[in-house]
Amino acid sequence: MITAGSIEANPDGFTLTDSDFEAIADFAYKHFGLSMSSSKKPLVSARLARQLRQQKVTNFKEYLDRLNGKNSAKERSDLLSLLTTNVTHFFREPHHFETLRTDVLPKLIDKAKSGGRVRIWSAGCSKGPEPFSMAMLIHSMLPDVGRYDFKILGTDIDPQVVSFAQAATYPAEDIAQIPAEYKTLVPQLEAGGKMPEHLRSMITFGVLNLIEPFPFKGKFDAIFCRNVAIYFDTPTQQKVWQAFQRSLTPGGYLFIGHSERMSGPAERHLKAAGITTYIHTPSSGGAQ
Ligand SMILES: C[S@@+](CC[C@H](N)C(=O)[O-])C[C@H]1O[C@@H](n2cnc3c(N)ncnc32)[C@H](O)[C@@H]1O
């Protein structure tokens, strides 16, 4: 990378001016909620240069025209993938799954058994290991879960990772990350590492942008949104926390990522209940 004043030239010869960078950063903020300071300029220049070459686009202005043009869905999702990471793995941050096992699921299983509706949401689920980890755990505690109204929703803004999650086929190195105590929960992995039907049938995957109003009528008993809000600035994070709080049942749980912090109006209704874990207590803070 060669930096000349306010202009980034990369080895591919594409030049990212300050105004190009600002236009890309504005686009990412408006459409995805991503917050990018000018320190990200070299990274953006390097990552997008390859994309420009592949798309046979000659400069960043033309690229921006494409992003803002019609039929730009694929270009937009490629940009999002280039600016964020989809890193995830099965049973990531295991303490949350332990809380789910000991504090959350016993109550939800009772609720389901007494005819209630149970919903858990993995928001920003990437390629799906997070909701599949939940499904394994739930299935281990309630093997006949299919008899009850007990479902998991997995959503992500990126249609490419959602398609991967729907295919539910994981390479051996991903499966190897499942801790030994949970390995027994996926004894019937199908050919090529496809998650078994009894787990797949518990989960619905879909594309959803967390900075837009949520389309749900019902509430969730637990929401995992981990390592997603890290890309947002504080005002956007606070809006998203509040939207989650409003989407939780009383007593519902919110789990966030290890480097994320709760703040803003939602704090009045979300009481800390463990490491980066919050319980919805609507009565403690007045009106919702
Ligand atoms: C690092 S992954 C986290 C995956 C999983 N939650 C975990 O902790 O392992 C971050 C995911 O957030 C998604 N994401 C980024 N901005 C988003 C937005 N505005 N709405 C929904 N998902 C978003 C990305 O596409 C990516 O798949």
Image (cartoon, grey):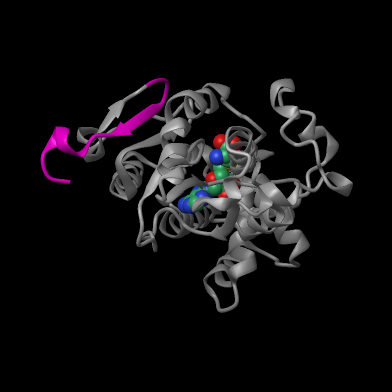
Q: Residue at x 78, y 34 (%)?
A: 175
Measured as percent of width and height from the top left, residue 92 is found at 61, 29
Q: Which residues are magenta?
A: 274-288
Q: Quadrant of ligand 1?
A: top right
User: Could you tell me which quadrant the N terminus lies in?
Assistant: top right
Measured as percent of width and height from the top left, residue 169 is found at 78, 49
Residue furthest to the left in view is 286
Is residue 45 in view? yes
Q: Residue at x 75, y 29 (%)?
A: 184
Residue furthest to the front in view is 114
Measured as percent of width and height from the top left, residue 188 is found at 81, 41
Q: Residue at x 64, y 42 (%)?
A: 132
Is residue 152 in view? no
Q: Is residue 230 left or right of residue 87?
A: left
Which of the pair 37/147 is nearer the observer? Answer: 147
144, above or below 95, in the image: below
Whether residue 118 is in magenta: the answer is no
Q: Residue at x 58, y 23 (%)?
A: 94
Looking at the image, how many numbered discs can be counted on the residues?
0
Q: Is residue 165 left or right of residue 227?
A: right
Residue furthest to the right in view is 191
Whether residue 276 is in magenta: the answer is yes
214, above or below 90, in the image: below
Measured as percent of width and height from the top left, residue 283 is found at 16, 37
Q: Is residue 251 left or right of residue 27?
A: left
